[in-house]
């Protein structure tokens, strides 16, 4: 058998033969990149916009055509691996394409700008204008939106011979006529216009004169005043006629004056151009003379008697018109007068006080000069004050009025209409009011939104279910007690110093804004909490008959009076309230009461609690003490020598020593378990307590009385 050649020798031989024969088994030629071109050398994008650049590799048969995209500022514009450029912020960035093979590079300069905000409208500050020849006015154009890119406007005139306009909107009047001045936006061609009327120069009024400076008329008569305008060729000769008192003399648009009632009125003419004025003083007189006998006009004997006394005459001397016509004031209160017939002849009367009489009617239509009227406590069912427009103060309280019309009395500053039968009250015309008392009527609503000058308001004892005082920021005193209020917002009334909102249905009361409060009565409501921490000026507080379980008055160090009785208090800290002189904390659930700091106390009511002890040794000023209906076993009053009244009944006292209480005049110590009672002889009415007990022994010395009590 022939021997086999090794395999690797055969391979070597074959390789050698192939190389020697220049036979190419495998060959691959690399084509390199020579250039990178972009489809754009520059580009402009808006913020947020995109564009995809395209790169071209040369030669086209280059082996590796891969490029890398980069940005010179990725905060201005970024580019992804596909050449997509995204604009991010205003500025410039070079977007580069670099070949992987050979690092050939080209770039596109990208400019990024904000989006263009187009104009949507053009508005002018005037839609019409009136100019005199030669005068100018500058119109102002407002572009919308305010951030529009191009706010440039072009100004034009529809008739440049009437009115021309420059590039800044300045209009110049040239001739009589009309022209439309237009503002047109360069962006979008939005347009608006102002119609300009051009007229001749105005010849102004320099003066006005009346044919009379004074005039005298009898009631019912008329006279026509004549006016002369200077210069005679004035452009606007319009005038306005007015009367200082239309109830004495009125004037129409032609200057015709009509006399209405006795008195004095000034008729004034005022030019529309320049407000030039002149005046005529008109005196209106009755159709009677000064010597006219008016005695029989006074049908009420008491009124007549008062007038005789006032004018210094005695009946049966005649009462003349001259006797009463100049009397300025009448004080007729409490004279048992039934009617005021004859009052019409007091034509200059300014003050009338006729309260507390028996008047059922009152006619004051001739007394137009009245400024103050008190007709309270009569029997009036109606009251017509429509002619008394000069009234500043009115008291018509305690009558039987069911309505009250004061719409003509716009000068009123003080109004008392309380204790009538009013079901409504319109004071919307009485904007000068500073004081209003309408309590004890039948009002179900009260609108005081127009009465912003009010400083004092009393509307208690009505049927109000709501009260809006948000407009009455000047209020210092408010009494709205005994209504049906379920809420009361006084956050706007920061000037309040006194507030009585007791006997309503309030469940909450926010006083945090009312830091000026000195007196507060919120008793007999349904309050469960009461925050007084901001009311540091309080001196008087009545919060009794609510549902309070706690009361913090540590901030109210100025308190002198505190009534918190009939609540659900289990504790009461008054250690900070050293100024207290009166305290009523009765009818609660107090088990202790520390009044050692309250040395100024003169009145103390702490009855109907659960007190087992009461230390009064520091309260030497006490004059009145009621500690009845507690659980006291001891009561030391040896330091309380000023006591006048003592109620300590219904406790568990066995001994009561009153020997130091020489000022005591009233005592109730019944319903205890007393065995001894000590007192100074004859210093108080022993009968006041003798009936409470039966004395078994009565020992009398020169200075003391010792009584042993027997049940």
Image (cartoon, rainbow, N blue to C red):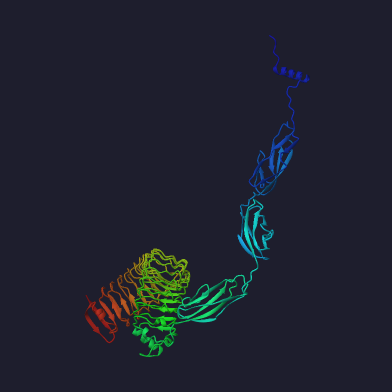
User: Can residue 313 be spotted in the picture?
Assistant: yes
Front in this rendered view, residue 79 or 150: 150
Residue 99 in the image, given as x and y percentages of width and height: 72, 37
Front in this rendered view, residue 567 or 487: 487
Residue 131 in the image, given as x and y percentages of width and height: 64, 64
Residue in the picture at 75% in, 36% down? 35
Front in this rendered view, residue 615 or 567: 567
Residue in the picture at 65% in, 56% down? 183
Does 218 sit above or below residue 132? below
Q: In the image, is 139 to the left or to the right of 409?
A: right
Does 496 sit above or below residue 127? below
Residue 231 in the image, given as x and y percentages of width and height: 63, 74
Image quadrant assignment for residue 70 = top right
Residue 485 in the image, given as x and y percentages of width and height: 39, 65
Does 89 sit above or below residue 16? below
Residue in the picture at 64% in, 69% down? 202
Image quadrant assignment for residue 23 = top right
Does 344 sit above or below residue 148? below
Q: In the image, is 693 to the left or to the right of 459?
A: left
Which of the image's four quarters has the N terminus? Answer: top right
Residue with the most extreme top position: 1
Which of the image's four quarters has the C terminus? Answer: bottom left
């Amino acid at each position: 058998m022939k021997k086999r050649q090794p395999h690797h020798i055969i391979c070597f031989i074959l390789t050698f033969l192939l190389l020697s024969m220049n036979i190419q088994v495998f060959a691959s030629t690399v084509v390199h990149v020579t250039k990178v071109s972009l489809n754009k050398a520059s580009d402009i994008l808006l913020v947020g916009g995109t564009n995809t650049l395209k790169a071209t590799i040369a030669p086209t048969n280059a082996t590796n055509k891969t490029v890398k995209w980069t940005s010179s500022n990725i905060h201005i514009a970024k580019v992804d691996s596909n050449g997509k450029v995204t604009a991010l912020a205003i500025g410039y960035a070079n977007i580069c394409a670099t070949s992987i093979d050979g690092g050939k590079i080209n770039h596109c300069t990208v400019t990024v700008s904000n989006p263009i905000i187009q104009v949507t409208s053009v508005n002018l500050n005037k839609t019409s204008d009136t100019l005199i020849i030669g005068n100018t006015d500058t119109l102002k154009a407002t572009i919308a939106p305010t951030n529009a890119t191009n706010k440039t406007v072009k100004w034009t005139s529809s008739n440049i011979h009437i009115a021309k306009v420059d590039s800044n909107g300045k209009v110049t009047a040239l001739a009589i006529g009309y022209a439309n001045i237009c503002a047109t936006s360069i962006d979008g061609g939005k347009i608006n216009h102002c119609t300009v009327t051009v007229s001749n120069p105005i010849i102004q009024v320099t003066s006005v004169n009346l044919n009379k400076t004074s005039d005298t008329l009898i009631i019912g008569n008329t006279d026509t005043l004549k006016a002369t305008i200077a210069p005679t060729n004035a452009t606007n000769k319009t005038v306005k006629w007015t009367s200082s008192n239309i109830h004495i003399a009125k004037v129409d648009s032609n200057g015709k004056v009509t006399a209405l009632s006795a008195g004095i009125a000034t008729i004034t003419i005022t030019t529309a151009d320049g407000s030039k004025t002149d005046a005529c003083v008109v005196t209106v007189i009755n159709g009677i003379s000064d010597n006219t006998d008016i005695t029989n006009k006074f049908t009420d004997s008491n009124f007549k008697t008062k007038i005789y006394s006032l004018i210094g005459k005695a009946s049966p001397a005649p009462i003349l018109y001259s006797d009463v016509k100049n009397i300025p004031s009448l004080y007729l209160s409490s004279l048992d007068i039934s009617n005021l017939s004859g009052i019409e002849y007091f034509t200059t009367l300014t003050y009338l006080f006729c309260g507390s009489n028996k008047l059922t009617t009152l006619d004051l239509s001739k007394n137009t000069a009245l400024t103050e009227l008190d007709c309270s406590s009569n029997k009036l069912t109606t009251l017509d004050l429509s002619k008394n427009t000069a009234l500043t103060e009115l008291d018509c309280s305690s009558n039987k009025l069911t309505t009250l019309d004061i719409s003509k009395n716009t000068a009123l500053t003080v109004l008392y209409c309380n204790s009538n039968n009013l079901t409504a009250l319109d004071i919307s015309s009485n904007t000068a009011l500073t004081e209003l008392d309408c309590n004890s009527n039948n009002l179900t609503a009260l609108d005081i939104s127009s009465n912003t000058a009010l400083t004092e308001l009393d509307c208690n004892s009505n049927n109000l279910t709501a009260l809006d005082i948000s407009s009455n920021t000047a209020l210092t005193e408010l009494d709205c007690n005994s209504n049906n209020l379920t809420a009361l917002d006084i956050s706007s009334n920061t000037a309040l110093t006194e507030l009585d909102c007791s006997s309503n249905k309030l469940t909450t009361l926010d006083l945090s804004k009312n830091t000026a409060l000195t007196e507060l009565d919120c008793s007999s409501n349904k309050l469960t909490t009461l925050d007084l921490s901001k009311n540091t000026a309080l001196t008087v507080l009545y919060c009794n008959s609510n549902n309070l379980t706690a009361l913090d008055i540590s901030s109210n160090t100025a308190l002198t009076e505190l009534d918190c009785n009939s609540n659900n208090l289990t504790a009461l800290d008054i250690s900070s309230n050293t100024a207290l002189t009166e305290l009523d904390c009765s009818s609660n659930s107090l088990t202790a009461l520390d009044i050692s700091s309250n040395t100024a106390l003169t009145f103390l009511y702490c009855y109907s609690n659960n007190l087992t002890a009461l230390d009064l040794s520091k309260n030497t000023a006490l004059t009145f003490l009621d500690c009845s209906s507690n659980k006291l076993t001891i009561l030391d009053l040896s330091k309380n020598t000023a006591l006048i009244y003592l109620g300590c009944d219904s406790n568990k006292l066995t001994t009561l020593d009153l020997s130091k209480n020489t000022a005591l005049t009233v005592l109730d110590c019944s319903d205890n378990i007393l065995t001894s009672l000590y007192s100074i002889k004859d210093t108080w009415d022993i009968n006041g307590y003798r009936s409470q007990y039966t004395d078994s022994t009565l020992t009398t010395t020169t200075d003391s009385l010792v009584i042993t009590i027997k049940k």
